[in-house]
């Protein structure tokens, strides 16, 4: 629906009379190059290590903003009714909006699924941060704190029916709102939420450190939002209080002083039908929630707090990597950097530290923890599996990862100090146990081809770990170029930190589909942009992403057979070679994998 800003205000007015400012604001920020949803390509992954073969990758760019326009917060994605569906938010300058996307631009009439519908247009310049796209199409976000006017958790249904526009309200449906939160004096700091289906709707989790209302305890809180009987109660259904978290950490060997405990934003998962919450804990004077030293995992529906909770500790000399949970600063706009699936597996990043060495160069690890299940409950975790790492203590040199790199706060002042940028970022795991993250690799290309001593360039890439073959793949790289019908786009840096960095919710639960934010790029035709890429790994023949290639997929392909891009029956998910039409080659791909 972003293309409405290019087409004029008449179409916009029909669908969102209250949001006419969008058309005026969007000329500067929207995709004036008209490539949004119209550049896509299929290729093969690059095998980094492992016994597996290359995997087909398909890449779409359903959302694009002109260089210098609005910025992005984290994107999320899932498979809803067999279709790719994701969400992202824009902020800064103009426009301010919550957007859902599929694979194409909505007004191209095909190939997407509610693509680029603006579901909330923030006319008052309020920002938002998406937290979760659930498999029923519920998009859940944080309406970010702006003065005292907006500090809510909200949601909206992103599934109106294929290619049917969604009305554009100026706010979502509140999950959590009330005195001290929404438009009232004071603050009950809210971070980026996580959610999981259940209880006639969904559970939503948030970590709060201001209990001035008397109803929101300091710590991890979980609300059950009942869609059949919505309630905006501020009282959480389950709580893991700050003081109890400090006790839990101390009992498990992590020193946290009373009153200094900080918990990360929670994540949710399952194992054998039991729902779990997981979050990090640390002392605020020793890294706080951005570098927790312990992760608690608990079956929260028991309602007994930390009783029966399981502790995960990082390897010796390491801390877990996450972000600042609440209370201001840029990190508060991020999503969780760790993730959990419905097998109880947890994947995390760790960062090495040495308190005795102020010049310590950190090593980063991508770890997978497999649960120990006894009597249908998680009772512990096995030692971690190192999927990849980068830094001086390199245990997996075959992964080809490099870094981290040091950035000076002031490049003109060597005494100004600086910080290391994570070599890895935003690890995520899906229900098949496959893992995705972003990282740095050495391209081998010298900065100066005429200088034999020139250093080589480090670029970003998105990595995919196929658990079935223990194989690591590169599936999208900085400077990759995709094109269709004369439209071309080259990817620039893939953010590994900050609000548009790779996060735990960037990987779909039930498919190997990844949403990736990319920043202002080296573009071969139209100059820089920033947007969202959707990457589908494998699944050749599987139109509806249910991990089976069967009669249902054949029916969908035949319904789109002989259709070309931008015709009503075209289906981008059935176009396995992404050449813009569904033809005999796509049918052959399907039959080769038919089960």
Image (cartoon, helix red, strand yellow):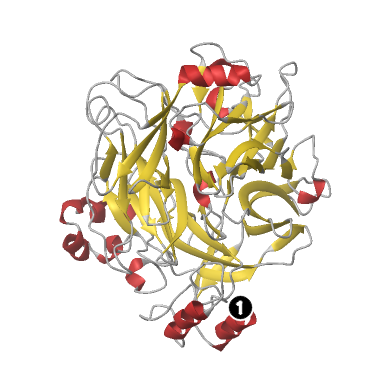
Number of labels in the image equals: 1
Q: Secondary structure at mark 1?
A: loop
Q: Is residue 468 above or below residue 411?
A: below
Q: Residue at x 60, y 85 (%)?
A: 588
Q: Is residue 505 visible?
A: yes
Tell me what residue is drawn at x 77 percent, y 45 percent.
455
Task: Single out the residue that lies furthest toward the top.
Answer: 258
Looking at the rendered image, the quarter that the C terminus falls into is bottom right
Would you identify the image quadrant in which residue 418 lies? top right
The answer to whether 26 appears left or right of 353 in the picture is left
Which residue in the rendered view is the most extreme toward the front?
375
- In-image side of 439 versus 6 (left or right): right
Q: Is residue 360 above or below residue 173?
A: above
- Label 1 sits on residue: 595
User: In front: 75, or 374?
Assistant: 374
Percent coordinates x, y for residue 290 in the rendering: 55, 28
Instruction: Tell which of 146 and 350 is nearer to you.
Output: 350
Picture quadrant where residue 419 is located: top right
Within-10-Å neighbours for mark 1: few <14, some 14–19, many 20+? few
Q: Is residue 117 left or right of residue 36?
A: left
User: Which residue is pictured at 62% across the width and 48% down the height?
Assistant: 438
Quadrant location, the N terminus? bottom left
Which residue does the image show at 35% across and 32% down from the upper left? Answer: 237
| One can see residue 95 in this view | no
Whether residue 332 is situated above or below residue 171 in the rendered picture? above
* Image coordinates for residue 449, horizontal then vertical, percent: 76, 54
Nearest to the observer: residue 506 or residue 231: 231
Give percent across and percent down for residue 153: 32, 38
Residue 589, horizontal then vertical, whole percent:
61, 81
């Amino acid at each position: 629906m972003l293309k409405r800003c290019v087409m004029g205000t008449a179409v916009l007015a029909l669908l969102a009379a209250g949001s006419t400012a969008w058309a005026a604001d969007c000329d500067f920020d929207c995709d004036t190059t008209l490539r949004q949803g119209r550049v896509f390509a299929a290729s093969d992954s690059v095998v980094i290590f492992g016994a597996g073969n290359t995997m087909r990758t398909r890449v779409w760019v359903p959302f694009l903003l002109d260089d210098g326009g609005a910025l992005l917060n984290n994107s999320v994605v899932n498979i809803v009714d067999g279709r790719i569906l994701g969400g992202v938010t824009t902020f800064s300058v103009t426009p301010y909006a919550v957007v859902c996307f599929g694979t194409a631009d909505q007004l191209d009439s095909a190939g997407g699924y509610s693509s680029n519908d603006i579901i909330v247009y923030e006319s008052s310049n309020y920002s938002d941060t998406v937290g979760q796209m659930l498999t029923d199409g519920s998009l859940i976000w944080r309406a970010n704190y702006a003065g005292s006017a907006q500090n809510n958790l909200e949601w909206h249904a992103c599934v109106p029916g294929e290619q049917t526009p969604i009305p554009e309200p100026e706010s979502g449906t509140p999950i959590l709102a009330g005195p001290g939160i929404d438009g009232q004096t004071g603050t009950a700091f809210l971070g980026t939420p996580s959610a999981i289906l259940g209880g006639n709707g969904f559970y939503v989790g948030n970590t709060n450190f201001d209990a001035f209302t008397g109803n929101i305890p300091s710590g991890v809180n979980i609300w059950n939002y009942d869609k059949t009987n919505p309630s905006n109660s501020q009282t959480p259904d389950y709580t893991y209080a700050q003081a109890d978290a400090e006790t839990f950490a101390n009992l498990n060997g992590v020193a946290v002083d009373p009153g200094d405990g900080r918990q990360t934003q929670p994540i949710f998962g399952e194992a054998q039908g039991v729902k779990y919450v997981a979050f990090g804990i640390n002392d605020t004077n020793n890294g706080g929630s951005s570098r927790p030293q312990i992760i608690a995992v608990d079956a929260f529906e028991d309602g007994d707090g930390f009783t029966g909770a399981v502790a995960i500790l990082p390897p010796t000399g390491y801390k877990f990597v996450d972000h600042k949970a609440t209370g201001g600063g840029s990190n508060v706009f991020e999503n969780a950097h760790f993730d959990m699936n419905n097998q109880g597996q947890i994947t995390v990043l760790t960062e090495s530290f040495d308190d005795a060495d102020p010049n310590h160069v950190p090593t980063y690890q991508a770890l997978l923890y497999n649960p120990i299940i006894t009597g249908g409950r998680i009772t512990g975790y096995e030692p971690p599996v190192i999927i990849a790492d980068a830094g001086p203590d390199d245990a997996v040199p075959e992964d080809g990862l490099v870094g981290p790199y040091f950035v000076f706060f002031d490049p003109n002042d060597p005494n100004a100090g600086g910080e290391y940028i994570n070599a890895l970022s935003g690890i995520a795991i899906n229900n098949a146990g496959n893992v995705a993250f972003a990282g740095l690799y050495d391209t081998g290309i010298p900065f100066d081809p005429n200088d034999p001593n020139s250093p080589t360039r480090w670029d970003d890439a998105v990595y995919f770990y196929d658990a079935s073959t223990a194989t690591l793949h590169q599936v999208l790289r900085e400077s990759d170029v995709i094109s269709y019908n004369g439209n071309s786009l080259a990817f620039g840096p893939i953010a590994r930190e900050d609000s548009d960095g790779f996060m735990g919710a960037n990987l779909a639960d039930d498919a190997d589909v990844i949403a990736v934010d990319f920043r202002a790029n080296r573009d071969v035709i139209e100059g820089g942009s920033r947007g969202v890429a959707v990457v589908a790994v494998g699944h050749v023949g599987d139109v509806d992403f249910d991990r089976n290639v069967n009669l249902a997929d054949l029916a969908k392909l035949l319904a789109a057979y002989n259709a070309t891009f931008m015709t009503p029956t075209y289906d981008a998910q059935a176009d396995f070679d992404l050449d813009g039409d569904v033809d005999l080659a796509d049918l052959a791909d399907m039959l080769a994998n038919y089960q």
